[in-house]
Amino acid sequence: MMKKTENKRKSKLHIKKVAVILIAILLLPYGEVCAEGITADEETLQAKRENLQSEAETVQENNAAIEELNKLIDEQWEEDYFAEMIVETGSALIEVDGDTTDFREEFDLSVGEARQIVDSQKSIEDYFEKDADGCYETERIGSEKVRVTAPFQTRRLIVTGVCLRNTYGASETITFSKYDTIILQYDTEEQAIEAYDKIRATYGDDVCQPDRVYSSDQLLMENTESEYYECVSWGVKRMGLENLKNQTGDKISLAADKVTVAVIDTGINSDSYFFEGRTITDTSRNFQVSSEENQEVVKQDEDISDQAESTKGHGTHVAGIIADATPDNVQLMILKVFNDEGRAPYIAIYAALVYAIEQRADVINMSLGFSGVDESLRSQFASMDAVIDQAVSDGIPICVAAGNEGDDLATCYPACNEQVFAVGSVRSVNDELIRSTSSNYGDELDFCAPGVSIDSASYQDNEGTATKSGTSMATPHLSAAVAYVKLLYPDMSVSRMEDFIKSYCNDLGEEGWDQYYGWGLPYLAELYQKENDSTESPDSNDSSESSKSDVSPGSDASSGSVVSSGSATSPISSVSPAPVSTEQSKTVSNPSATAGNVVRKLSKVKSFKVKQTKSRRIVVQWKKSNGVSGYQIQFAKKKNFAGKKNIFIKKAGKTRYVLKKQKKGRTYYFRIRAYKIVNGKKVYSSWSAKKKIKIK
């Protein structure tokens, strides 16, 4: 009891002592004496008091400045701010902070205006520096691209380390005195630039910077691994091209940032998922003529679609194999030469070949040919021989289908031209590659590639595949292989290219070259590794088989793009891709899961909204979906979505998209769905309810 009372007494004395000290401290600024009897220096204590008061005021000031700045950012933020824009010569598409959009729509341009602007790097620079609405800076990337930024788009300057005598016309000023920084907001970009120049001229270049906008990709130091792409065609895998496709983004040193493959065929179904993210060049053209027009007249327009029943998506399937086998920096130049009746005059094919050379295609794919060309008819192709010679002189390899008659390819043109790469077809039997018996053979055969039961893009089902067979399907496999070599060695000659591909061939049939397999099957899985490790640099048709088994010689199975020339006295005026049997043309839905993968059904995108802001912009917003890879937005002028346009959002965390400068008075319909990538394929949710908006 005594001990407890004593402790309580000591505790009370301690509290009193602390209280005395605290009172003394509070009285220090007024020159009082502390409890211990020590007289404080009045001047020093006054300074401390003032410093404490000043610090409190500074904290309060900075908190107020932060609130003010947050409000300023919120009020001044524009929906069309961006970090960087990549514009490529000859392309109708631009990349804005990783998302691809239409150049014409983004800047409200006509087709002619857009083409003129993207004609060259110089014309792109001139447009953004002189004509575009806004203040932009440009920087060339390589020989084809231009990076565009708008450093003054926020109309805001940051000034540090100096005491400004005036604000040079700023509409708002925010000061962070503790950090010796002033934020200046202006009403226009031009005012901001003028103030920027004056401040730097007066105080030095380092004191003033524009308030730039950055993307998350530029700032977040996240170490992410890209999803593994699983190719659709078994032939792509068998040639090691799937391996290359998945290596392309892994710090592989490439001499060319893009390669263009010209596909002379029936057109393309560009809405197929095979071509998502793939550049189909503005130089793509249609060389077809309608059946009632004179066949000597070539009609040239922009319709490169591949919807004719007569050709059954031949061109789409061929282009799809190239897309399946290669990364997105292999772009496609689609040259449509067949009309809706499945016919094409010689002059259309000739014109397309000339055009591909003039447009500087890097590789040309011709999954077509004229069959029944004996020696007496060979001279009719002298004009095309000259064009092929020019292509070779310009370093442009031409990959051609050998034909499917099971005959000597000496009678199939242009496969019989020794300057082209003639491609035969092989099939897999118990994992062994053997020649398709319908595949042509002979002295001019160069290589073979998978050509039986090849899955690729469908012309009818945007989310599905179609299966076809023939040397037409083998040829784009080789074109894809050549495209990879062109990425490494863009200036390689055609003759050197042949030797180079030969060095990567797996020999089939008799040892060395033989008339049934040529030099064998190219296998390029280790191309990047071997060439990047090397200290030496190299010098600078089808048709479908009626079933999955081969068609025997002499059968009446027609060949996809290889046709009879008719009588010996008649000029060869047309070439038609033959129909593919139902068995080989089957269309299947894009599966939501593959063996060994279970994918839960994706839910519809929630909270989908479409609204208009100033300057006729449309803002599309939605709630983030869990467990998805991205989103697909469709919009159209008609409620049935005829003539729709697709926008793919490749960032799962993104929840808004802005379309700028839509036409006043026009009505648009929107819908959205989510997708998840499974084994390289997109699995989609159901579409949202459609939203309607009229631009005011």
Image (tube, grey):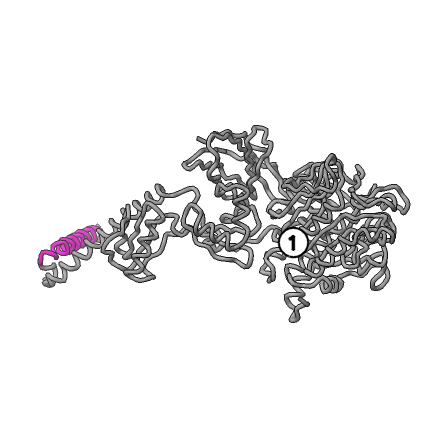
Tell whether 527 sits left or right of 578: left
- Residue 611 in the image: state x and y as whole percent: 45, 33
Q: Amino acid at mark 1?
A: Glu
Residue placed under numbered mark 1 in the picture? 358
Q: Is residue 12 visible?
A: yes
> SS class of the residue under badge 1?
helix
Q: Quadrant of the C terminus?
A: top left
Tell whether 519 sits left or right of 493: right
- Residue 71 in the image: state x and y as whole percent: 32, 43
Is-magenta flag for residue 58? no
Could you classify mark 1 by the number of other residues whose Cα lies within 10 Å: few (under 14), some (14-19), or many (20 or more)? few
Q: Is residue 655 visible?
A: no
Q: Which residues are magenta?
A: 4-32
- Residue 92 in the image: state x and y as whole percent: 56, 46
Which residue shows up at 85% across the image and 42% down it?
557
Height in image: 138 above or below 635? below
Tell whether 72 sits left or right of 694: left
Q: Spot the residue most to the bottom.
A: 535
Height in image: 532 above or below 4? below
Tell whether 415 sits left or right of 684: right
Q: How many marks?
A: 1
Q: State the residue in front, 301 or 505.
A: 301
Magenta span dominant secondary structure: helix
Which residue shows up at 81% across the image and 51% down it?
380
Q: Spot the residue most to the right.
A: 554
- Residue 317 in the image: state x and y as whole percent: 71, 44
Is-magenta flag for residue 11? yes
Which residue shows up at 50% across the image and 57% down it?
140
Which image quadrant is residue 463 in?
top right
Q: State the residue in front, 75 or 48.
A: 75
